[in-house]
Amino acid sequence: MTNTPETGTDSTAAPARPKVSAWNIANVVTVIRLAMVPFFVACLFLPGSGWRVAALVVFMVASLTDLLDGELARRYGLITDFGKIADPIADKALIGAALISLSVLGELPWWVTVVILGRELGVTALRFAVIRHGVIPASYGGKVKTVLQIAAIVSYIWPGVPDPVRWVVMGAAAVVTVGTGLDYVIRAIKLRQVAKRARAV
């Protein structure tokens, strides 16, 4: 390998990858999921079993878009900093709206909603607090947490699910939610430490 005399850098180095626009199909799907939240809430509060089923369908479709935008981003190289931030925010908006609505309706204890949303809001605040050092992407544990939360909420929206089943699934979701929250705190501390050492060099 040779170096150019002007810069001293390797002339055979691969060209930099083109910057991916934030306005791509993966991020559009994420924004659509966010837009579905108020429609879901409206369906959940309207009386009648038909609206309840409609709320369930909207919630499940919105939840499936989480898998879709992630797959699109990975397959077509559409991963952006906007997507890394907007995707978890859209997830939290959907999950948060569902939990609060169920608690307002008297179907889910408020302490469950407070614990889960407290973790979600805390992690979101943590993401923005360390964003100048770098972006903390969603972890595998975070995806498991999201799946458990979705399953638990579906069990509460779906009529006729036995209460013990609802409690077990929601309990598992709460435990994993708290555990992954602690993991994010550790990752944020490590990211900040790495950034400090990099600035010190």
Image (cartoon, rainbow, N blue to C red):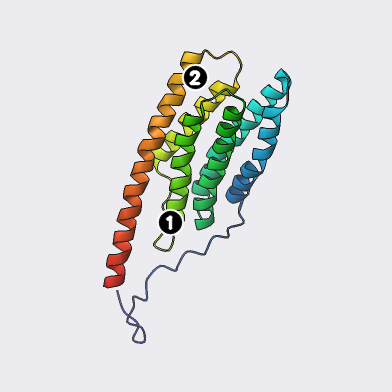
- Reading the image, the residue beneath label 2 is 166
- In terms of secondary structure, where does tag 1 sit? loop
Q: Is residue 47 visible?
A: yes
Coordinates of residue 2 in the picture (x, y in percent): 30, 78
Front in this rendered view, residue 48 or 63: 48
The quadrant the C terminus occupies is bottom left
- Residue 160: horizontal and vertical position, in percent? 59, 13
* Residue 72 showing in the rendered view: no
Q: Which of 182/30 is in front? A: 182
Point 63% across, 26% down: residue: 56
Q: Foreground mark, 1 or 2?
A: 2
Query: Residue 188, relative to residue 43: is it above or below?
Result: below
The amino acid type of the residue labelled 1 equals Val
Foreground pick, 80 / 43: 43
Q: Amino acid at mark 2?
A: Arg
How far from the left and from the top, in percent, is residue 188?
A: 35, 53
Instruction: Identify the residue at horizontal 69%, vertical 28% (top origin).
Output: 45
Q: Residue furthest bottom?
A: 6
Q: Residues within 10 Å of mark 1 (few under 14, many from 20)?
A: some
Would you name the residue on which mark 1 appears? Answer: 135
Q: CA distance from mark 1 to mark 2?
A: 34 Å
Point out the tag, 1 or 2, that comes first from the N-terminus. 1
Q: Is 95 displayed left or right of 5 in the figure?
A: right
